Image (cartoon, coloured by chain):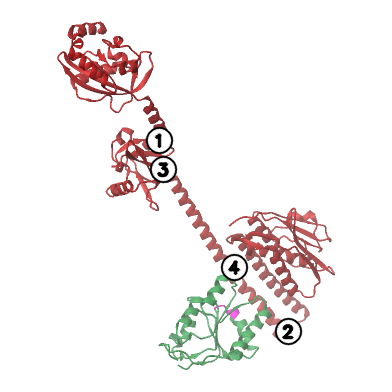
């Protein structure tokens, strides 16, 4: 019904006759000279005339276009709205781009739609006000833009793109969710809307500073940056800035990352570190006190027993003197236990300091010291040269000392002891031809206070091998032993090299 | 500034250690030379002739101070620092005698200007022997300095 009425009104209100006149001809040439596809539309929405660029763009002949409702060139879904818009323009006929802020689409004769940019202006004629419609196919540009928007939208961080003056021109969904604003609230606003109040005054200066010396870099290096949400709350951020060259101008792209979680982790790490440090300090205080305060009473026990035996020997019979000797023996043994336990604890708590360590040299000096302290022994030592590793020198020296002094101790009953330190396919080893142990008890070997020999046969605190195991474990290695009772023992250990 | 030096000042809060030290010295006829104070504050009062010891002459000094580290009130390290900081006592021989073999204590002792650092053994015979050696060395072998610098640095 409307169409028919429209045709009537067109035919009645506007004849094509003037276009046949000389003036009409001039206007047609003018229209032809316009670079964009252009048509003239009458107040009822029918095409009066169009240039050949327009015909080509839409796939109609000139004849097909004249008198055709311009709505035919609008995709069907937009037609109802288009009618309203068209009427509105008729009442406000100022030159302007059509559909500002929206992606426009046009429809060709074959039904294919394409992205279009459309400018409108009004042209008063003796027959009434016509509307000049210039249409540009911007599919290619739209594709590039879409790809760009897609990139921005898919970025993991909030992306805010601004003019050099700080006006926001583009944001992604992450920006909306991070800052709690709707996109429409941000577009056209100044970037300072996202900056905490107390920095808002100074921010334009920083912004100008960046625009003066642009480039890709982090913002506020070394500073703790915060973002401000719509609700006024703040959160720690990390911001990277870069620039985009567009149409001879420049845009600033800010990539904003919420680092709340990372900050939390950092705080938790710091807390854990300081807890570890205070535990370390507490341990230091504890072991100092053990070293100092537990030794003093032992010195008194041993000292006064010794003084009794020395000064008052005439008052004691042999049994009494033997008892005194036992008291002193126990005191001295306890002193050794304290020392060993402290060593074990230190080996566990000591800070790990990895350097290059010459194990062969450590073994050589440990055996030299043992020979010096026990000059009566005949022991053959075989040390493989050039065994170096990366590890903690103090810990490794302690472990080798323990293993070698064990070997030294357990070869005591051999006319000629033999102690070997070297490396084979399985790792390092310390081998002796001493008393050995029963493999049935090998599981107990590395336990604290576990001993496989009675103190009458071989003295010891039962802490040495536990200490060695801790050292090896702290190097990420493992230790095991094999033995045939009375035919010597071999202790194997691995030391995966770890760098400092 | 002339200084006279005689005897040993033992700074020791543990009565057992004091008794054992005195016994070892007595057996080597060095006991009449010993003065005992039981905390760091008392040690400084004695050395600088203050309070209880105000009647003393500050220039009448021990030949050697045997100084424990773990002391009530003022620590052995602080006593050592105070001794070294005063021109009247800066060259007073100080031997640290402690149960501690801690690196930090050794370093602190030497850095603080201790003349010697001795770890008290638990074993009775070793202990007696060390105390005897200390007494003999500092009372008989070592040559004491009997002049001191005045506060203005002149001898």
Name the foreground residue: A350 vs B129: A350
Mark 4 falls within which chain?
A
Q: Reply above or below: B66 against A443.
A: below
Alpha-carbon neighbours of circle 4 within 10 Å: few (<14), some, or many (≥20)? some
> Is residue B25 highlighted in magenta?
no
Q: Residue furthest left?
A: A126
Q: CA distance from mark 4 to mark 2?
A: 33 Å
Do marks 3 and 4 both belong to one polypeptide chain? yes
Picture quadrant where residue A147 is located: top left
Viewer-nearest of discs 4 and 2: 4
Q: Colour of chain B?
A: green
Q: In the rendered view, does A218 fall on the left or right side of B141?
A: left
Residue at which label 1 appears: A152
Mark 1, secondary structure of its residue: helix
Q: In the rendered structure, which segment of residues is drawn in magenta?
A: B13-17
Residue A464 vertical position relative to residue A8 in the rendered view, above or below? below
């Amino acid at each position: 019904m409307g169409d028919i009425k429209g045709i009537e009104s067109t035919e009645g209100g506007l004849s094509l006759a003037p276009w046949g006149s000389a003036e009409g001809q001039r206007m047609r040439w003018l229209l032809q000279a316009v670079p964009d596809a252009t048509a003239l539309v009458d107040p009822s929405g029918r095409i009066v005339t169009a240039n050949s660029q327009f015909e080509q763009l839409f796939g109609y002949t000139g004849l097909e276009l004249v008198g055709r409702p311009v709505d035919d060139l609008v995709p069907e879904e937009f037609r109802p709205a288009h009618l309203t818009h068209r009427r509105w323009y008729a009442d406000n006929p100022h030159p302007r781009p059509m559909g500002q802020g929206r992606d426009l689409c046009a429809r060709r004769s074959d039904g294919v739609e394409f992205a279009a940019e459309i400018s409108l202006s009004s042209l008063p004629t003796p027959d009434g006000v016509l509307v000049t419609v210039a249409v540009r196919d911007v599919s290619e540009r739209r594709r590039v833009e879409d790809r760009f928007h897609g990139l921005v939208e898919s970025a993991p961080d909030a992306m805010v793109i601004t003019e050099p003056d700080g006006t926001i021109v583009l944001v992604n969904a992450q920006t909306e969710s991070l800052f709690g604003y709707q996109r429409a609230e941000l577009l056209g606003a100044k970037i300072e809307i996202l900056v905490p109040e107390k920095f808002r005054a100074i921010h334009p200066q920083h912004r100008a500073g960046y625009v003066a010396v642009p480039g890709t870099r982090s913002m506020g290096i070394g500073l703790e940056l915060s973002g401000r949400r719509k609700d006024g709350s703040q959160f720690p951020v990390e911001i990277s800035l870069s620039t985009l060259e567009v149409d001879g101008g420049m845009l600033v792209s800010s990539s904003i990352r919420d680092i709340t979680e990372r900050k939390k982790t950092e705080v938790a790490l710091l807390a854990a570190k300081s807890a570890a440090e205070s535990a370390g300090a507490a341990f230091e205080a504890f072991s100092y006190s053990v070293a100092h305060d537990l030794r003093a009473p032992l010195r008194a026990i041993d000292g006064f027993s010794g003084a009794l035996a020395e000064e008052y020997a005439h008052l004691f019979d042999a049994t009494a003197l033997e008892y005194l000797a036992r008291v002193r023996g126990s005191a001295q043994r306890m002193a050794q236990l304290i020392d060993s336990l402290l060593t074990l604890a230190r080996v566990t708590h000591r800070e790990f300091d990895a350097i290059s360590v010459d194990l062969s040299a450590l073994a050589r000096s440990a055996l030299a010291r043992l020979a010096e302290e026990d000059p009566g022994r005949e022991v053959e030592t075989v040390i493989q040269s050039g065994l170096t590793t990366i590890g903690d020198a103090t810990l490794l020296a302690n472990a080798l000392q323990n293993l070698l002094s064990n070997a030294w101790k357990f070869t005591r009953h051999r006319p000629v002891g033999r102690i070997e330190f070297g490396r084979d396919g399985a790792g390092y080893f310390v081998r002796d031809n001493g008393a050995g142990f029963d493999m049935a008890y090998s599981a107990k070997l590395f336990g604290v206070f576990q001993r496989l020999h009675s103190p009458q046969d071989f003295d010891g605190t039962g802490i040495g091998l536990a200490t060695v195991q801790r050292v090896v474990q702290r190097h990420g290695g493992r230790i095991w032993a094999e033995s045939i009772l009375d035919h010597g023992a071999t202790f194997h250990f691995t030391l995966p090299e770890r760098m400092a | 500034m002339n200084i006279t030096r005689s005897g040993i000042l033992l700074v020791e809060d543990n009565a057992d250690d004091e008794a054992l030290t005195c016994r070892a010295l007595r057996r080597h006829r060095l006991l009449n030379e010993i003065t005992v104070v039981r905390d760091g504050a008392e040690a400084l009062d004695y050395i600088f002739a203050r309070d209880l010891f105000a009647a003393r002459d500050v220039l009448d000094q021990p030949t050697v101070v045997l100084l424990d580290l773990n002391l009530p009130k003022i620590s052995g390290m602080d006593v050592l620092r105070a001794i070294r900081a005063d021109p009247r006592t800066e060259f007073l021989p100080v031997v640290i005698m402690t149960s501690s073999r801690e690196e930090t204590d050794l370093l602190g002792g030497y850095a603080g200007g201790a003349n010697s650092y001795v770890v008290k053994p638990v074993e009775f015979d070793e202990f007696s022997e060390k105390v005897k050696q200390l007494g003999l060395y500092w009372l008989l072998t070592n040559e004491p300095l009997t002049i001191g610098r005045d506060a203005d640095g002149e001898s």
